[in-house]
Image (tube, helix red, strand yellow):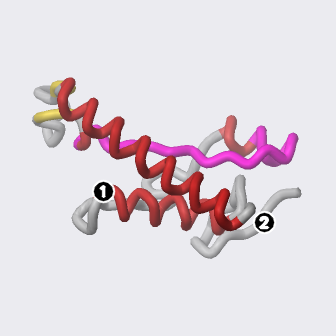
Amino acid sequence: MPAGPVPWSGTLSTCPAAWITGLARAFREELGPEAGVAINQPFSGGFITNAHYWHRGIPWIQIEVSRALYETGSDDPATAVADPGRARDAGALIWTALARFWDELAEEGT
């Protein structure tokens, strides 16, 4: 059941490659062209995602969110502070991107 190598070099996938690229596309569409959306950068997932996929065949995608979406002063960790309004807005953007991705999967029947 493992998906095998993916188009981005040096990594193994824990779900179909089309899912990863589709989710990245949904985030780019929701967050806008100025937002950086990366796949496996700076992290490429961890033990839990790999264990569930490789041992049980359950597809997994790990999403990591930049603190810059919800913190003020995040360039300096010593002064970074979570902003409740920004956190709420970030949550709404993330939810919308996930819903967009899920709807596209449902339309494709995957």
Question: Residue 30, relative to residue 56: is it above or below?
Answer: below
Q: Disc 1 on helix, strand or loop?
A: helix
Q: Residues within 10 Å of mark 1 (few under 14, many from 20)?
A: some
Residue located at (49% from left, 48% from top):
98
Residue located at (74% from left, 48% from top):
59
Question: Residue 41, relative to residue 45: is it above or below?
Answer: below
Q: Residue furthest front?
A: 107
Q: Residues within 10 Å of mark 2 (few under 14, many from 20)?
A: few
Could you tell whether 15 is left or right of 95 in the image?
A: right
Q: Which residue is mark 1?
A: 31
Q: How many marks?
A: 2
Q: Position of residue 43 (x, y in %)?
A: 49, 50
Q: Which circle marks residue 4 in the picture?
A: 2
On-image quarter of the N terminus: bottom right
Residue type beneath disc 1: Leu
Q: Disc 2 on helix, strand or loop?
A: loop
Q: Position of residue 39 (x, y in %)?
A: 49, 61
Q: Which residues are magenta?
A: 51-68
